[in-house]
Image (cartoon, grey):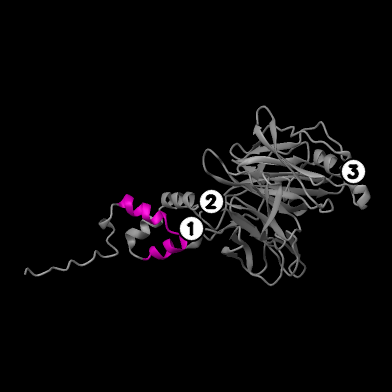
């Protein structure tokens, strides 16, 4: 009887025992958590699993919605933001230094402002040294851990006004054609006799050096004032959209439809103001006014903008219903109403902010001061509670890759 030879099994690190395409298809079926451990098998496996094309393919196959929620309170936490799934399970915690507070979230990055001795002012005066100094603002990238320090200087044309410039407001976006990341900010200049005046600046993020950004450049002023805040401005595909201050005030406080353009645009690539937009048709039902009167509440309306699946959305509400409009054609000013959501309790007047639309039409909503994010299903006209909100200072859909966050 011939001697039986025992052939040893191939080493786990020998990537050549399977065709690369076959191995890739097998690994794509596994969850991100398992793939993180498999990166330790060998250099070849690590190279394959670290490939951005593999990560994108894995993300497409295991598609799940992630939420990035930021905090700016001082409740003893060192966490600036949490990235979580819709079950509330935290995928990654974004930690900061003592005194850091998360201000806003843009393009999966967190804007951070330093708080010193309980003071949140952008400028602080040191009475001992008799010097005015600036607390450093930062931009954090949760996936990579990159920290970009935002320049604390000003555009050359604004330097002499530095002592009277009030706390800035930031927006962060990416130029569609070049891929450059830029920061757009608005400053208030206050002086006796002139009052408050809006000033604008732009800087380019230096992605090759995570410690700095390029210097600030002056952007042209506007004759009209704009609203630049949590729900009144947004960046989509390299274009800044801001609500006009006077039009916003007329609609939200005076319940008057204005003939002025509703939205101003700023192009991050050319660093110039673009054409303004009239906005969707807005109406004021009589029953809404009666409802507010019967409840003894001020008749304040919601008018906000949002990035909804990379389209500009305008939200009008909050009672008797919330209407969500999408801009279909910029050049023609064509808007379409995609949702008209009726809420059971008219007394809930906090803004309703849409975050994401699923392929089946369900939409994730964030209601300020509400305990949970909610998913609205237009097919059944129902709202389902999901992630506990914990009074976020900012919340957005996280568009980054789950695999990179897990490792």
Q: Is residue 310 above or below residue 407?
A: above
Which residue is at 48% across, 58% downward?
A: 404
Q: Which-is-in-front pick, marks 2 and 3? A: 3
Q: Quadrant of residue 48?
A: bottom left
Most foreground residue, 47 or 66: 66
Give x and y (percent) for residue 245.
79, 41
Q: Main secondary structure of the magenta part?
A: helix
The residue carrying pointer 3 sits among few (fewer than 14), some (14 to 19) or many (20 or more) residues within 10 Å by Cα, namely some
| Badge 1 or badge 2: first in the primary sequence | 2
Answer yes or no: do the residues labelled 2 and 3 have beta carbons within 8 Å?
Answer: no
Q: Which residue is mark 2?
A: 206
Q: Secondary structure at mark 2?
A: loop
**For marks 3 and 1 on the same chain, the one whose residue lies earlier in the sequence:** 3
What stretch of residues is rendered in magenta? 20-40
* Residue annotated with mark 3: 289
How far is mark 1 from mark 2, CA to CA? 21 Å
Helix, strand or loop at mark 3: helix
Does residue 78 appear to the left or right of 228 in the view shown?
Answer: left
Q: Observer-nearest residue: 190 or 287? A: 287
* Left or right of 188 in this view: 175: left
Image coords of residue 45 (percent x, y): 35, 59
Farthest residue to the bottom: give it. Answer: 76
Q: CA distance from mark 3 to mark 1?
A: 49 Å
Compute the Cα span from label 2 to label 3: 50 Å
């Amino acid at each position: 009887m011939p001697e039986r030879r025992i052939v040893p099994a191939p080493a786990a690190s020998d990537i050549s025992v399977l065709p690369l395409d076959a191995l890739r298809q097998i690994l794509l079926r596994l969850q991100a958590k398992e793939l993180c451990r498999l990166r330790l098998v060998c250099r070849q496996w690590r190279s394959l699993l670290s490939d951005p094309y593999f990560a994108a393919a894995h993300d497409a196959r295991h598609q799940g919605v992630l939420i990035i929620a930021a905090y700016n309170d001082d409740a003893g936490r060192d966490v600036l933001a949490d990235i979580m799934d819709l079950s509330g399970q935290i995928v990654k915690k974004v930690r900061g230094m003592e005194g850091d507070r998360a201000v806003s979230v843009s393009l999966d990055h967190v804007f951070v402002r330093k708080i010193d001795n309980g003071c949140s002012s952008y400028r602080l005066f040191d009475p001992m040294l008799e010097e005015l100094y600036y607390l450093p603002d930062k931009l954090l990238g949760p996936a990579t851990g990159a920290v970009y320090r935002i320049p604390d200087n000003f555009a050359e044309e604004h330097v002499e006004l530095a002592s009277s410039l009030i706390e800035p407001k930031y927006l962060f976006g990416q130029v569609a054609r070049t891929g450059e990341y830029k920061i757009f900010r608005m400053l208030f200049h206050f002086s006796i006799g002139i009052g408050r005046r809006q000033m604008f600046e732009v800087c380019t993020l230096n992605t090759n050096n995570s410690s700095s950004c390029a210097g600030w450049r002056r952007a042209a002023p506007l004759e009209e004032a704009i609203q630049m805040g949590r729900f009144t401005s947004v960046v989509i595909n390299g274009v800044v959209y801001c609500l006009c201050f006077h039009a916003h005030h007329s609609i939200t406080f005076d319940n008057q439809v204005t003939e002025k353009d509703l939205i101003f645009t700023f192009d991050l690539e050319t660093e110039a103001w673009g054409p303004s937009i009239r906005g969707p048709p807005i109406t004021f039902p009589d029953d809404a006014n009666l409802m507010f009167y019967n409840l003894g509440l001020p008749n304040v309306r919601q008018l906000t903008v949002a990035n909804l699946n990379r389209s500009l959305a305008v939200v009008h509400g909050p009672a008797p219903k919330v209407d969500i409009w999408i801009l279909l054609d910029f050049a023609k000013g064509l808007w379409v109403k995609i949702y008209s959501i009726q809420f059971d309790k008219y007394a809930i007047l906090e803004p309703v902010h849409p975050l994401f639309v699923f392929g089946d039409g369900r939409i994730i909503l964030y209601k300020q001061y509400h305990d949970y994010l909610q998913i609205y299903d237009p097919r059944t006209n129902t709202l389902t509670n999901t992630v506990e909100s914990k009074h976020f200072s900012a919340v957005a859909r996280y568009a980054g890759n789950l695999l990179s966050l897990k490792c």
